[in-house]
């Protein structure tokens, strides 16, 4: 992910980095995050230099709000990775929100 962001000239700014475990099987969450970050970075390339991520802990999930839209193709690939784990993704107004299930 870092190499893709660097190649596109996009930095990553995370609002908070809480120590929390998420439920994951076969690296589904890390793969979903990579798809989301790379898709958002591609959308922001040439328009912004930083992808901002707002992290909030909720009762049963970790919510990540990204200030970019990863694109329909990425969303279609992310959903089947997260939904079997109880997670999800929603894109509105050019911003993506991912819910990752807490372990």
Image: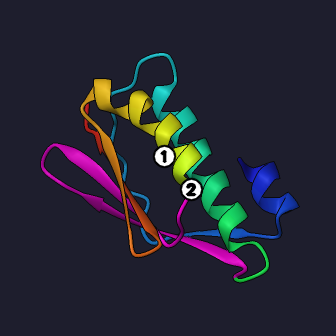
Query: Which label sits on residue 8?
Result: none
In the picture, measured across the screen, residue 63 lies left or right of residue 25, that is left
The rendered magenta stretch, by its main secondary structure, is classed as strand
| Rendered residue at 73%/79% (across/down) | 49
Magenta-colored stretch includes residue 84: no
Q: Is residue 14 above or below residue 99?
A: below
Question: Crowdedness of circle 2 by 10 Å Cα count: few (<14), some, many (20+)?
Answer: some
Rendered location of residue 75, percent (x, y)? 48, 46
Magenta-colored stretch includes residue 53: yes
**In terms of secondary structure, where does tag 2 sit?**
loop
Residue labelled with disc 2: 71
Q: Residue furthest left?
A: 59
In the image, the segment drawn in magenta is 48-70
For residue 25, which quarter of the picture?
top left
Image quadrant holding the C terminus, namely: top left
Cβ atoms under marks 2 and 1 closer than 8 Å: yes
For residue 58, which quarter of the picture?
bottom left
In the picture, measured across the screen, residue 28 lies left or right of residue 22, that is right
Q: Residue furthest bottom?
A: 47
């Amino acid at each position: 992910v870092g190499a893709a962001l660097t190649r596109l000239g996009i930095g990553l700014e995370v609002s908070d980095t809480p120590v929390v475990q998420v439920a994951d099987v076969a690296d589904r969450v890390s793969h979903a995050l990579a798809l989301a970050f790379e898709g958002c970075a591609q959308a922001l390339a040439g328009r912004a230099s930083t992808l901002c991520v707002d992290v909030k802990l909720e009762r049963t999930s970790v919510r990540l709000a990204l200030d970019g839209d990863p694109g329909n193709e990425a969303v279609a690939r992310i959903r089947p990775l997260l939904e079997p784990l109880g997670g999800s993704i929603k894109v509105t107004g050019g911003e993506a929100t991912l819910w990752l299930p807490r372990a």
